[in-house]
Amino acid sequence: MKAVKLMMSVSLLIASLGASASELVTPELQTKIVEQGVPREALDRLVRFFDQNNGREFKQDVYTCDGQDPASVKPCEEKKRKKAERTVTLKGHEYGVIIDYTKPSMETRYFLINWKTGVVSKTLVTHGKNTGELYAYKFSNVKDSRQTSLGIYVTGETYSGSYGATLRMYGLMSSNDQAYNRDIVMHGAWYADSSFAKTTNPLTKLPYNRLGVSWGCPAISLSLAKKIFPLLKDGALVYHYHPGLEEASMSGREVRGVNPELPVVEPVL
């Protein structure tokens, strides 16, 4: 099956499942998770997606690299790439991640969820360079856009990349199904630490007061990447959440919301 194209409204998605028990997490654990700051709507969407697609196979457009083992997931330069296909299967996993991209990068918007215990760990996470500075408000699935893609992913293999520990992600929706070919991965980065905010922006001569930005990847601190990625690899769901833009993002093209950093201009009467 091709990547899921969910053009339905949230209400239709909820109605299709009714009040059936979740295969991923109990109602009691859902309440516990929400009480730790996870957005209720994001959690509901992710749980329902799993319930609808558990056991489903998703065909992925990927690439292999000349001179590398065909099973390798490590990136290579464009001229060495050959189109290929890979199948990933959605299955149960102990952990999941929700990233609330409605929040600014200096707030802990990365929620690592243990589905068995309901314990949530929170940390900082970046967004793409062309998605915004402090806030994320522009998203796309377009190659070389250097923008974050919304929607639900499943984790794959780990490898050692430019920043060390790196985790492959496979996009399961038409809003993010080019993740592999765009090399949208989860990785550690020095600029994903709170200390970056205090460094000086050479253009403004003032502190950044935000995290650094990636080329579209959700980057976390280097120290946490080493600890978290072994827990998340091979089948964890990762949800890039921004409710007001998700339906429009299914086109794959750029979608834009309002940049909260800009002042609100009152109409002249």
Image (cartoon, rainbow, N blue to C red):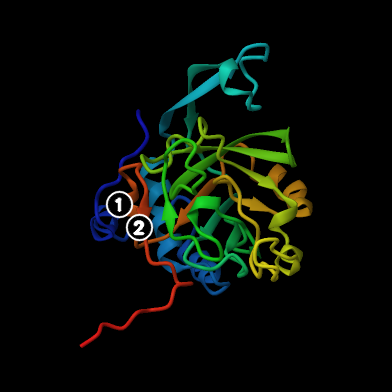
Q: In this view, does 127 lie above or below 36?
A: above
Q: Give the x, y percent position of residue 50.
A: 43, 47
Viewport quadrant of the N terminus: top left
| Residue found at the very far top of the displayed protein | 67
163 vs 48, left or right, is: right
Query: In terms of secondary structure, where does tag 2 sit?
Result: loop
Q: Give the x, y percent position of residue 154.
A: 52, 41
Query: In terms of secondary structure, where does tag 1 sit?
Result: helix
| Residue found at the very far bottom of the displayed protein | 269
Q: Give the x, y percent position of residue 95.
A: 60, 51
Nearest the camera: 58 or 257?
A: 257
Number of the label disc, if any, that sits on residue 248 = 1
Does any portion of residue 97 appear in the rendered image? yes
Q: Is residue 234 above or below residue 247?
A: above
**Residue kind at label 1, given as amino acid type:** Ala
39 vs 227, left or right, is: left
Residue 173 placement: quadrant? top left
Number of the label disc, if any, that sits on residue 245 = 2
- Residue visible at 66% across and 27% down? 74
Does any portion of residue 221 appear in the rendered image? no
Label 1 with label 2: CB-CB less than 8 Å: yes
Alpha-carbon distance for marks 1 and 2?
6 Å
